[in-house]
Image (cartoon, rainbow, N blue to C red):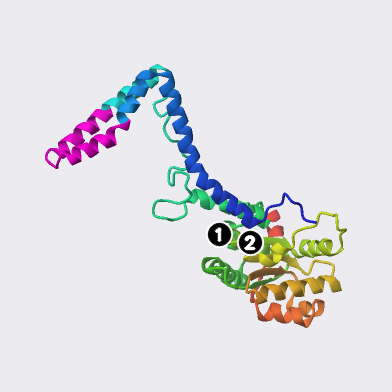
Amino acid sequence: MKRDDEMTYEETRRNIIREYRSKNLLAQQKAEEKRRELDEKFPDIARIDDALSETGLKILRAALDGKDGLDEKIAKLRKDNETLLSVRASLLASKGYPADYDDVHYDCGLCCDRGYTEDGNMCCCLKKALTDVGLEYSGVKKLVEKQNFDTFDLSFYSGSSRETMEAVLRICRAYTDSFDGKMHNLLFIGKTGLGKTHLSSAIAKEVIAKGYEVVYESAQNIFSDFEKEKFSRYDAVIPDTSRYFNCDLLIIDDLGTEMPSQFTVACLYNLLNARLVSEKSMIISTNVGKNELLERYSERITSRLLGEFGICVFEGNDIRSQKLRR
């Protein structure tokens, strides 16, 4: 059974957005509480606050009296307010308080903790909060710190391999730039240590930053989760495999390293077919070549892998070994 305290990715996102709706209000409430505290402790500050609060009413009265001399009246009110604020700041300082003690303090000055700027666009602070959640749920949070587009080093490739990998990198960058939730699948084929995991992580990071749900997992762990779901006792805590079907982008790493069985083949077919039918994107990396894919998996699977995926063949020499020699 699934743990009751486990929240889904979407539930967590909704909670963060709800928290932002209340953050702005809480900041204002805290400032108001401090203002009341000062007014109760210090009558001279309270009198200044009362005078400042009447500014709007004074402007309205001046406007109702007619336009003659209105600008001068407003200028005088502004100057009077500046004087009152200066006196207030001096009083606060004399009593050991900073001048901005009861100002509204927002965590983010760009959106005033609303999550959205005045032009209606999502603020960078909310984007970061949602991206952090996406990275946490995706399984690539630690990977993307070192494996992203900025750290992908083409100097490890030479000759024709360099040209091939430059093309692969362009494909991966274009994939993230154009990702819009519609189905677009990639199959990474190549030996160990050629950058398949690195570019998978890089894509995951960029797609998550665009607000989409990404799940990144090894084929072995995915099949293990399906096995636990099917064969565990009723009272056991089982993984939530629905995320493999529902996420916007599923990245399956190291297909072909799992112990093959009728069960794993059936799981893979069901997962591939379900996501293709629902038109959800996938990226699959494998150390297994095309011919071995045909030998290892059924024709129903290989026809989908080779027919419904854009194929990127990784070439070169093991980067891990090269790094050790540098």
Image x and y of residue 314, in percent: 66, 70
Could you tell me what secondary structure mostly forms the magenta stretch?
helix
Q: Nearer the viewer, residue 104 or 56?
A: 56
* Residue at x 27%, y 36% (from the top left corner): 57
Q: Position of residue 115 (x, y in %)?
A: 48, 49
Q: Is residue 316 left or right of residue 2?
A: left
324 or 25: nearer the viewer: 25
Image quarter of the N terminus: bottom right
Q: Give the SS element for disc 1.
A: loop
Going by the picture, which residue comes out furthest to the left? 68
In the picture of the structure, the residue carrying the numbered disc 2 is 214
Q: Amino acid at mark 2?
A: Val
Mark 2, secondary structure of its residue: strand
- In depth, the one of 150 and 105 nearer the eye is 105
Q: Residue furthest top?
A: 94
Question: x, y percentage for residue 227?
Answer: 83, 64
Badge 1 crowding class, 10 Å Cα cut-off, few under 14, some 14 to 19, many 20 or more, is some
Q: Is residue 14 left or right of residue 37?
A: right
Q: Is residue 276 above or below residue 50?
A: below
Identify the residue at horizontal 79%, vertical 61% (top origin).
225
> Residue at the location (85% across, 67% down)?
259
Q: Is 54 covered by the magenta stretch?
A: yes
Residue stretch in magenta:
53-82
Q: Position of residue 173 (x, y in %)?
A: 55, 66
Visible residue check, residue 97: no
Residue receiving disc 1: 211
